[in-house]
Amino acid sequence: MSLSLLMFVGFVAVTMAITWYSARQGSGASHFFAAGRSIKGWQNGIAVAGDYMSAASFLGIAGLIAFSGYDGFMYSVGFLVAYLTVLLIVAEPLRNAGKYTMADVLAYRMRPRPVRAMAALSTLTVSTFYMIAQMVGAGALVSLLLKDTGVSYEMAVIGVGTLMIIYVVFGGMLATTWVQIVKAVLLMIGTVALSVMVLAHFHYSLGEFFEAVTHVTYKVKDAAGTESLVTQNFLTPGLEYKLPYGPLELISLGMALILGTAGLPHILVRFYTVPDAKTARVSVVWAMGIIGVFYILTTFLGFGAATIVGRDYISANGGTNMSAPLLAQMLGGEVFFAAVAAIAFATILAVVAGLTISASTSFAHDFWTNVVHHAREHRPEEEVKVARITAFVIGAIAMAIAIGLGKAANVAFLVALAFAVAASANLPVLVLTIFWKRFNTMGACWGLGCGLLASLGLIVIGPSIMGVDAADAKIHHLIQMAPLFPLKNPGILSIPLGFLGAILGTLMSNEKMSEAKYAELHVRANTGLGAEKASSH
């Protein structure tokens, strides 16, 4: 058994023990969906960080910096700054006004059936696309890291999907939380250790390190296919985001990251696991600290890979996503390479488990209980049963689509779509529900619908799906024609459209919302009065 596989098995054994322990701690809807609201602030902060720092962060951003320099680093800035939006706008009101899902806040003063149905649709869309991207990434990564053991892409996808379902179905939110905590701790240890190794390579001199970053040499091909060596300053903007649309692309990406994070379902559900709003704020501060350190350290991972390993070697041995593991192999040998591979595996598992429980919670609580059976007596045990069945179904669908797409699929647009939908559909209605007295049910439905359709539509007619250069190794276009929308990230247009839909829907409706209900929501969102009584029901 290879060292990488041995460490994978070790991590799985630990997380299975956590799941078994969690399953014995309690039962019922509150335990399954919100871990009994017993998670402490520092625990939830680490879990939020573990949920947020996905494989796209650890592997993808390191690879982007290794290949695109300064432009790749801008991703890190966007992910970090995003948590200010979460802290200032949604964390406290969400915890005070809701019970299990984002739709609880919307339904507090709106007609519940239509807003819950639309919110469930948006949540399932975001979670599914994000999950498929993670599953494809997991299959490609694990099959590459364990290629000597005979593990294929399909086997890797099925293995990750099966583990994800086990965590959620048997352990619920408590197991998912502790898997995310273990993953976050491992990820931070690995990232810090690798960053120290990079600095040691440059004699702990930041001047020497950044001097090397200004002279990165790699091969390029001209139009005739002739190779030549070029030396590039990787601290110069514009390597990835070139004119004419580069600046707009970067702004659009930043908008999606900064506003989308506050609307990601698997991040939002984490605030229901804590006992009160103060603990929710504490958990966000913990998360920001951990996430801030991590994204600063991705600078050393990415630039270290570019200067020590080299772009050409990375390209020949798995591509951009292998930048951090190959750096670990070169600096720490096979043992450290295996450890980093296991951390990447843990990262994928934890994020996918978080996505699964947020999607199954939304379907069971919002759609099944409050839309399909709205007139019947609420049965928490049935809600949990439906959530578990949903986890099986969503897991199976994600595995099937990931296997169908194949490891060569262009999944970058799936992640961009998840953030774009969250920023365009979820965030506008959350903000307007909390801060606009006139906002009503039609406005919420229009906002969710316009944001969802705008982000989906712009992705479909953008360069991620459409394009005439099918020979480009990095792009697998599904539609062979020139893109109608020039940007890969639709946020710059889809987010205003989401807000516009919500505002127009409200103004065109004659529905009069209860001012007393808005005042009650405003007081509860800002003070927490009445929140404990509601969440205990």
Image (spheres, rainbow, N blue to C red):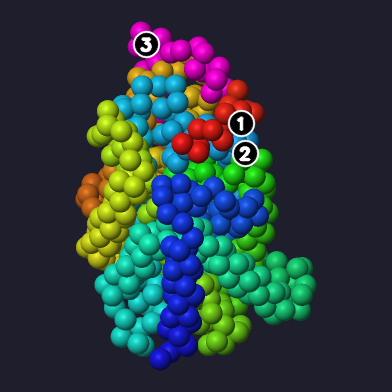
Q: CA distance from mark 1 to mark 3?
A: 28 Å
Q: Which mark is residue 277?
A: 2
Element assignment for label 2: helix
| Residue 504 forms part of the magenta stretch | yes
Residue beneath the point at 52% across and 44% down: 272
The quarter of the displayed image where residue 506 is located: top left
How packed is label 2: few (under 14 Cα within 10 Å), some, or many (20 or more)? many
| Residue 93 forms part of the magenta stretch | no
Image quadrant holding the N terminus, namely bottom left
Question: Which residue in the protein does label 3 denote?
Answer: 511
> Residue 314's x, y, as percent?
47, 75
Vertical order, 134 against 441 (above or below): below
Q: Which mark is residue 367?
A: none
Q: Is residue 306 visible?
A: no
Circles 1, 2 touching at the beta carbon (< 8 Å): yes
Q: Which mark is residue 528?
A: 1
Element assignment for label 1: loop
296, 98: nearer the viewer? 98
203, 436: nearer the viewer? 436
Residue beneath the point at 61% across and 28% down: 529
Q: Amino acid at mark 1?
A: Gly
In this image, 282 relative to 30: left or right? right
Q: CA distance from mark 2 to mark 3?
A: 31 Å
First in sequence: mark 1 or mark 2? 2
Q: CA distance from mark 1 to mark 2?
A: 7 Å
Element assignment for label 3: loop
Magenta span: predominant SS is helix
How packed is label 3: few (under 14 Cα within 10 Å), some, or many (20 or more)? some
403, 44: nearer the viewer? 44
Magenta span covers which residues? 496-522
> Residue 283's x, y, as percent?
63, 49
- The residue most toward the bottom is 1
